[in-house]
């Protein structure tokens, strides 16, 4: 299993700080709840950048050998020259694995540092669609939803109360190796840019896909009201700890204050769209960075390990949801979009969990489907 080395590059700080004493987020820069108040997100480390940019060639300097038709280009061209305006945003080395690159590719006016928050942690439970958009690690984890009957409760759901619906991305998105046909099993898929191989643009490396719940009001597990999301820890491997969109539901440090395990970004394109950015490795109570395979390896705080785009989630104060105190609620309430209030009834079609592949990129170009190469060493152990 591949695990990332401790990060030491640049990615940023953020937009809502944890009030350590109270244990609730406040509007300011996001910081970890350790003694150092580590700014979040942290930079992507040099080992991971080297793996993606150099070993796997997702670099602006990579020479394109074959174009989208599988033929040699009529004249020499680099990956950075091909992925440039006006057709694409300008690709720079590092974009494939960072939140900055992800938001640029998706045409979002989001600053990973200034716009990070820990809210909303809960959503209207009618219906939602979730798309895996970045995997900066090799933990094969599922995403699930859970009921949030009381947004002010600090009690997380039990494992049996989390309902998986987004499979682990490597399988779900049909991630492929550099040859465009062999299954890719070592994570880091999808990346934050286009899904065509950097050397061979005719090789599609993964298939973008969104997963929909349909109408949760017709799901027997749904109790009405709000729902939260959980990155479900796996009994096998090192990513054993579940992480929750509700800040107060996460592992607590020795002071009894939750660690920040999830950053949330509000889409600038879609009113009810959000990005959930998770750290995948466990965060022990004593030290949030010590949950890896050996001393010095653990959570890095770059929040690119697994990133999902959540859409069609009406905030609690709209379309059947209660509450009206505004984006993020108030510091006196649990993290969420809106304040208190009772969710209204939901209506719509069945609860079938379905998936669908987008037909175009954010730029209206045809969607391909692949990931990064498979020449990999263990970068986290």
Image (cartoon, helix red, strand yellow):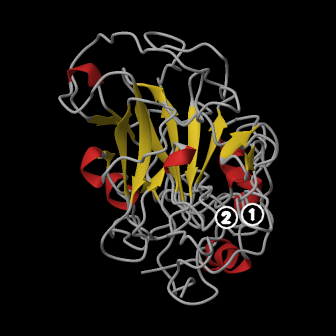
In this view of the protein, can residue 52 be seen by the observer?
yes
Q: Nearer the viewer, residue 15 or 173?
A: 15
The quadrant of the image that shows the N terminus is: bottom left
Q: Check contact, mark 1 vs mark 2: CB within 8 A.
A: yes
**Numbered circle sitting on residue 42:** 1
Residue drawn at the location 64% of the way across and 66% of the way down: 58
What is the residue that sits farthest to the left in this orientation?
220
Q: In this view, does 205 lie above or below 294?
A: above
Q: What element carries label 1?
A: loop
Q: Is residue 324 above or below residue 337?
A: above
Residue 333 is situated, as x and y percent measured from the top left of the image, at: 62, 30
Q: Which of marks 1 and 2 is nearer the N terminus?
A: 1
| Within-10-Å neighbours for mark 2: few <14, some 14–19, many 20+ | many
In this view of the protein, can residue 88 be seen by the observer?
no
Is 20 placed left or right of 254 in the picture? right
Residue drawn at the location 61% of the way across and 59% of the way down: 259
């Amino acid at each position: 299993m591949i695990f990332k080395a401790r990060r030491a590059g640049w990615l940023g700080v953020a937009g809502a700080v944890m009030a350590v004493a109270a244990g609730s987020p406040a509007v300011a820069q996001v910081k970890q709840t350790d003694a150092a108040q580590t700014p979040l997100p942290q930079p992507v480390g040099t080992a991971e950048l080297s793996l993606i940019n150099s070993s796997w060639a997702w670099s602006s300097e990579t020479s394109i050998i074959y174009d989208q038709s599988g033929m040699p280009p009529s004249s020499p061209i680099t990956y950075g020259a091909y992925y440039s305006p006006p057709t694409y945003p300008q690709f720079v080395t590092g974009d494939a694995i960072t939140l900055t690159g992800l938001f640029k590719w998706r045409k979002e006016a989001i600053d990973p540092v200034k716009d990070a928050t820990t809210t909303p942690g809960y959503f209207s439970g009618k219906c939602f669609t979730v798309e895996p958009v970045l995997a900066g690690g090799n933990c094969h984890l599922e995403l699930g939803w859970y009921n949030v009957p009381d947004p002010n409760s600090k009690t997380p759901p039990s494992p049996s109360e989390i309902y998986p619906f987004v499979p682990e991305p490597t399988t779900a998105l049909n991630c492929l190796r550099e040859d465009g046909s062999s299954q890719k099993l070592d994570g880091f898929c999808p990346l934050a840019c286009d899904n065509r191989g950097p050397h061979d643009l005719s090789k599609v490396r993964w298939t973008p896909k969104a997963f929909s719940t349909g109408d949760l009001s017709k799901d027997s597990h749904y109790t009405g009201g709000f729902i939260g999301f959980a990155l479900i820890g796996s009994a096998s491997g090192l990513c054993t700890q579940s992480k929750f969109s509700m800040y107060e539901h996460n592992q607590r440090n020795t002071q009894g204050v939750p660690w920040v395990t999830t950053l949330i970004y509000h889409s600038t394109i879609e009113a009810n769209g959000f990005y959930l950015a998770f750290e995948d490795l466990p965060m022990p109570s004593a030290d949030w960075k010590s949950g890896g395979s050996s001393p010095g390896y653990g959570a890095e705080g770059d929040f690119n390990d697994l990133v999902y785009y959540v859409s069609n989630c009406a905030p609690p104060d709209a379309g059947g949801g209660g509450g009206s105190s505004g984006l993020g609620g108030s510091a006196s309430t649990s993290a969420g979009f809106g304040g208190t209030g009772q969710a209204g009834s939901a209506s719509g079609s069945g609860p079938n969990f379905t998936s669908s592949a987008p037909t175009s990129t954010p730029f209206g170009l045809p969607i391909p489907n692949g990931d990064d190469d498979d020449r990999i060493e263990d970068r986290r152990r």
